[in-house]
């Protein structure tokens, strides 16, 4: 596998072997689905398997990996295939730094575990953003259900904050885990996320794990005391504009408070080499026509006011 990747990278042949199916899982608890990454089009319902580990070693997973070894995109990887054929960088380079330590990953053995966990436990959120969906916000889900004539009948994404999650139940986070990525909903208010972080700390895994967390920065609670114990922390702030445009998109948040929280975060961890900060901006009809109003402020805020180490927007 390593030689195949090296050869294809050198010759720029298409497709280069993707490491995601060999190293990573994407878990979305609100829909009880799993995949190798978030870009994978068709995700698998966990109801069809006894556990995530059972899926990881299944014939489906082996066939998926074998397709890449044979130099072919699996049909579910259409997004990355289309992007790369059209000169757009796909998500695949994000997995290149993960080592391939499982020599028998096609045939399967008891020691195989994913090294990168993309964990999205449920749709618990404290905002109802205009571009969001019921599977990512329980407040948006509530609106959809209030107006079935507009949004039609919706699936039930209800969550149970007291239940033990499959990620911990199946012990997918372990001494071999190198990366943990957490999204919501909003991770900082989610008991399942806190349980996962505590699990990593209590079992002494956190010191070896690079943590990525996407947050709306509506609060600076005890979550940040937990994540400081990880090896590295990459914080991605979901900020789609500033000022009135931001407040229109991200109800009921107020831009002044969100900015205040991010600046406090920057002051608290300035000089801490573990932390990196970035902004995630969803370009959409509700902010596209006011760019001249909010983009200058966003750029000034990010590059001039934030003192913590940054990587980009």
Image (tube, grey):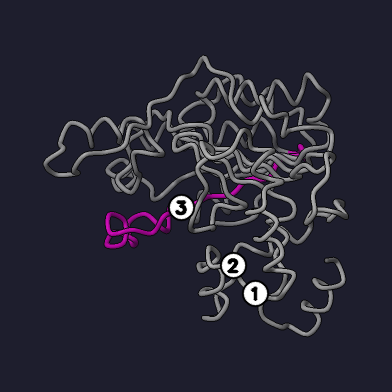
Taking the spot 39% from the left edge, 39% from the top edge, the residue there is 135
In the foreground, 249 or 300: 249
C-alpha gap between disc 3 and disc 2: 39 Å
Q: Earlier in the sequence, mark 3 or mark 2?
A: 2
In the foreground, 4 or 54: 54
Question: Which numbered mark, 3 or 1, is in the foreground of this view?
Answer: 1
Question: Which numbered mark, 3 or 2, is in the foreground of this view?
Answer: 2
Disc assigned to residue 72 = 1
- Residue 15: x %, y % from top left: 66, 76
Q: Secondary structure at mark 1?
A: loop
C-alpha gap between disc 3 and disc 1: 41 Å
In the foreground, 109 or 91: 109
Q: Earlier in the sequence, mark 3 or mark 1?
A: 1
Q: Is residue 273 magenta?
A: yes
Q: In the shown orientation, is residue 220 left or right of residue 148?
A: right
**One can see residue 273 in this view:** no
Which segment is the magenta one? 271-297
Mark 3 near mark 1, Cβ–Cβ under 8 Å?
A: no
Taking the spot 65% from the left edge, 26% from the top edge, the residue there is 196
Taking the spot 57% from the left edge, 45% from the top edge, the residue there is 236
- Residue 234: x %, y % from top left: 66, 43
In the figure, 306 relative to 287: above or below?
above
Outermost residue to the top? 162
Outermost residue to the left? 149
C-alpha gap between disc 2 and disc 1: 6 Å
Q: In the shown orientation, is residue 289 left or right of residue 70?
A: left
**Residue at mark 2:** 74
Structural crowding at the residue carrying mark 3, measured as other residues with C-alpha within 10 Å and reported as few (<14), some (14–19) or many (≥20): some
Mark 2 near mark 1, Cβ–Cβ under 8 Å?
A: yes
**One can see residue 288 in this view:** yes
Disc assigned to residue 298 = 3
């Amino acid at each position: 596998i390593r030689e195949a990747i090296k050869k294809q990278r050198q010759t720029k042949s298409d497709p280069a072997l993707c490491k995601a199916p060999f190293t990573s899982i994407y878990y979305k608890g609100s829909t009880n689905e799993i995949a190798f990454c978030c870009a994978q089009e068709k995700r698998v319902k966990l109801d069809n398997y006894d556990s995530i580990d059972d899926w990881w070693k299944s014939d489906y997973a082996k066939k998926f990996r074998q397709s890449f070894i044979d130099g072919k995109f699996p049909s579910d990887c259409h997004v990355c295939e289309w992007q790369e054929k059209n000169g757009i960088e796909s998500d695949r380079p994000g997995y290149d730094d993960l080592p391939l330590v499982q020599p028998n990953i096609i045939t399967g053995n008891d020691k195989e575990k994913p090294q990168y966990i993309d964990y999205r436990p449920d749709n618990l959120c404290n905002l109802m953003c205009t571009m969001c969906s019921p599977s990512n916000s329980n407040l948006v889900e509530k609106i959809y259900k209030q107006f079935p004539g507009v949004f039609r009948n919706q699936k039930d994404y209800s969550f149970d904050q007291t239940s033990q999650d499959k990620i911990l139940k199946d012990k997918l986070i372990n001494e071999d885990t190198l990366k943990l990525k957490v999204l919501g909903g909003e991770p900082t208010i989610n008991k399942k996320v806190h349980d996962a972080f505590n699990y990593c700390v209590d079992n002494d895994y956190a010191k070896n794990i690079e943590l990525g967390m996407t947050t709306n920065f509506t609060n600076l609670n005890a979550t940040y005391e937990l994540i400081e114990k990880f090896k590295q922390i990459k914080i991605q702030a979901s900020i789609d504009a500033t000022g009135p445009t931001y407040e229109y998109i991200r109800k009921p948040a107020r831009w002044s408070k969100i900015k205040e929280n991010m600046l406090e975060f920057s002051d608290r961890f300035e000089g801490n080499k573990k932390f990196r900060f970035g902004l995630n901006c969803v370009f959409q009809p509700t902010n596209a026509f006011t760019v001249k109003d909010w983009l200058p402020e966003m750029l000034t805020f990010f590059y001039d006011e934030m003192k913590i180490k940054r990587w980009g927007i």
